[in-house]
Image (cartoon, rainbow, N blue to C red):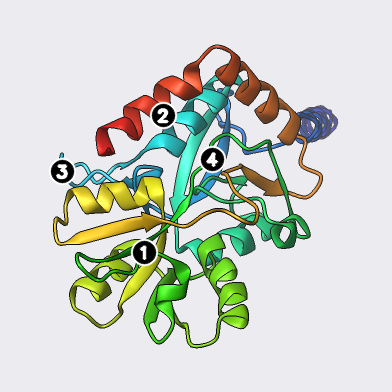
Amino acid sequence: MQIKKFSWFFTLAIALVVAMNVLVTACGGGSTDTAGGPQKLVMGTSADYPPYEYRDTASGSNEIIGFDVDIANYITKQLNYTLEISDMDFNGLLPALQAKRVDFVMAGMTPTEERKQSVEFTDVYFEAKNTIIALKGSNLTKVENLVGKQVGVQLGSIQESEMKETAEKITGINLKPLNKIGDLIQEIKSKRIDAAIVEDTVAKGYLAANSDLEFNVIPSEGPSGSAIAFPKGSALVKPFNDVLKQMKDKGEIETLVKKWFDKEA
């Protein structure tokens, strides 16, 4: 009798576990807090791109902060998720997304046609322009001035792909891809490269701390702007777009633009 009673309780326990797993799976997206709290979403980023995302070394916290981080926190809070940030090299972001090590990517990423073949993007939430950063007095004011020069680009970035296309049209531009924007800046200052191609909003931040540098804006010809990347077919794209639209309509995006970009001007 005791054996039958134990068997009955054991069967009931297994059924409850299966039911809970089905419920969790049905919720979709992210991972679930074991205490029954909000689900967690992991954001992949490359925290070397101020003011979009960077380490807060000034305060000593080393926390990842920035424009993208504020937007991600706002969206996930509105959708009742908690947010975890995973920092990695820029060129590793989309592979991490495809391998499902992260749920989405925010890194000032441009939704190019090439990237759209492997991932899905939200609407563009901010647009910026590319610039040529060089030592003051270098007179590298336009792309044609880069012929015969060593030009740095961030590995895996839209700037790298655009400059590869440019180098095919204008011979003599020698590209040097590096993982970090900070590395590009140091290479310029050490005169191991002549210039680097960096987004204007990011360039302003670095120039504020490096008075020996200058930048000139390159007119945009291809895809531009930043969007959030998801795995193909992700159910999160629509709700993220809905909140982005809400943020734009309410002026929240503009408030964050002033917070993170105006102070760099």
Q: CA distance from mark 3 to mark 2?
A: 21 Å
Q: Position of residue 238 (x, y in %)?
A: 75, 29
Amino acid type assigned to the residue bearing label 4 in the image: Glu
Position of 127 relative to 249 (above/below): below
Q: Which residue is mark 4?
A: 127
Q: Going from the N terminus, do you reach mark 3 or mark 2 first?
A: 3
Q: Is residue 137 left or right of residue 175?
A: left
Amino acid type assigned to the residue bearing label 2 in the image: Val
In contact (CB < 8 Å): disc 4 and disc 3: no
Q: CA distance from mark 1 to mark 4?
A: 21 Å
In contact (CB < 8 Å): disc 3 and disc 2: no
At horizontal 60% and vertical 14% (from top left) the residue drawn is 249
Q: Which residue is mark 1?
A: 141
Q: Which residue is mark 3?
A: 58
Q: Going from the N terminus, do you reach mark 1 or mark 4 first?
A: 4
At horizontal 33% and vertical 52% (from top left) the residue drawn is 203
Choose top left, top right, bottom left or bottom right for residue 75.
Answer: top right
Q: Which residue is mark 2?
A: 257
For label 2, the SS is helix
For label 4, the SS is loop
Q: How many marks?
A: 4
Q: Going from the N terminus, do you reach mark 1 or mark 2 first?
A: 1
